[in-house]
Image (cartoon, rainbow, N blue to C red):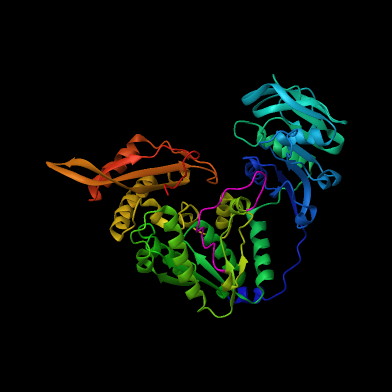
Amino acid sequence: MADNLTEATSPATPRSPRAAIVVIDFGSQYSMLIARRIRELNTYCEVVSYNATAAELDHLDIRGFILSGGPNSVYDEGAPHAAEWVFTSGLPILGICYGMQLLAEQLGGKVGPGREREFGPATIAASQNVPLLADLPSELDVWMSHGDRIEELPPGFSSVAVSENSPVAIMADIPRGYYGLQFHPEVVHTPRGKELIANYVHGVCGAEANWTPGNFVQEAISSIRAQVGTGRIICGLSGGVDSAVAATLVHRAIGDRLTCIFVDNGLLRAGEAEDVVNTFERNLQMNLRHIDASKLFMSGLVEVTNPETKRIRIGNTFIEVFEAEAKKIEGAHFLCQGTLYPDVIESASHGAGSARIKSHHNVGGLPERMELELVEPLRFLFKDEVRRIGAELGLSDEILWRQPFPGPGLAVRIIGEVTEEKVSVLQAADSIFLEEVHAAGLYRDLWQSFAVLTDSRTVGVMGDFRTYGNAIVLRAVVAEDAMTADWARLPYELLARVSNRIVNEVQAVNRVAYDITSKPPGTIEWE
């Protein structure tokens, strides 16, 4: 640990701008997915709004741009356009769907409504062997989603692939490295899409494949040391993978000058408080302050049934407890948070705008009077990247694959008023469900799996007696980053085993149901 402290006080080595592909977002639901696909190729990528300035990207060594899809038509009044500096940069540009039409329209071509709209699977046939299609067959199955089409190509472009309803499925200006795709290569429904994206990123743009966990850890540690100097950092631990990896990175950078605060709100999963203390204090030897404030949190939830009121009360209590404890730590001027890239994008006004994030996200919303500077080492990472970084840091699978858990905890999985008795009932049912999911080897395949305690009481029969008990709903979803999610098709045998165990082992419950709602239209959590 002494070596860490000595190293942390030395000046950070200046770093060159990171080589990157920049996705310019015009409101597409797939913009983040494009970035994920590029990062899967070990090349760094950032998503920026269409109105971003060149100065905002000075921290990057940009090798090429991708213009995303979007909900507009390029000829609509007020439709977003790409900034002029993108075209004068001299760098390659790939336009996808709306981005392709924008590329055509801004460079002198003409776009109009298609005679036949294309939504869903299609086959394109290439007429030329261009760098974008290197080592790909002349016919490709792709996923279309458009109502407009190119009517006149801009000067310097030619059509290099067609589909049944698109005379320009791919257009190219090879000398300038400009390409347009009428389809979406980033979705799984375009089977060879990742290879096409790789051809653009590595072949056309010449971007290096050096976005690796090892490189990231080195850069993050250097960045943390440069930001913090000889200062101290507070980190709010939640028990989840994000705060765990963020805390471990900071601990690796500055050692014992990190203090973690774990606020136990009494609304955690069964045994979770003990697991957090055991992991971070005993196994990782971090300075950890475990604050059991469960009585305080519960007192603030008496007779509260509105979900948003629950979130606000829990959030305010968390701030009160966290702030009081943080004041006891002398010389701490920094706050570490496990903010991820989807949070950053969702919080900004990219493309068509962003939805409001729920109240109380992690330790967000801490009052400005605390005057703590944020340290967010994961703010440009997706969840799967965080897990890879955690593995690089040596964290256990138990930590890295722990499913996401809402900030307000079980309060938003208990419909109606939250009481200690209801928390105990839900913890018991939830624990059985997770135990059986683990035993079936399905835990890692699921984004989240949990139980919900409804406010319904139902009639049942146990032996010769009539019962009137609680109804539990099981929820399990698959997702990449929770922007969308699909209900998990769990085996009937697993559901039957879980239902049987809950009804027999949790005395207050006599009925179990399974939620088969996807997001959208539903949300993952019930409240």
Vertical placement of 111 versus 6: above or below?
A: above
Left or right relative to 369: residue 442: left
**Which span is picked out in magenta?**
348-367
- Compared to 476, does 181 lie above or below? above
Determine if residue 394 is in view.
no
Q: Is residue 400 left or right of residue 48?
A: left
Q: Quadrant of residue 88?
A: top right
Image quadrant in which the N terminus is located: bottom right
Could you say which quadrant of the image residue 228 lies in? bottom right
Residue placed most toward the observer, 471 or 336: 471
Q: Residue furthest bottom?
A: 330
- Closest to the observer: 301 or 196? 301
Residue that lies at the very extreme toward the front in this rendered image: 77
Residue 350 within the magenta-colored segment of the rendering: yes
**Residue at 37% over, 61% down:** 301
Residue 270: % across, % down: 35, 58
Q: Position of residue 278 (x, y in %)?
A: 42, 66
Residue 427 visible (yes or no): yes
Main SS class of the magenta portion in the image: loop
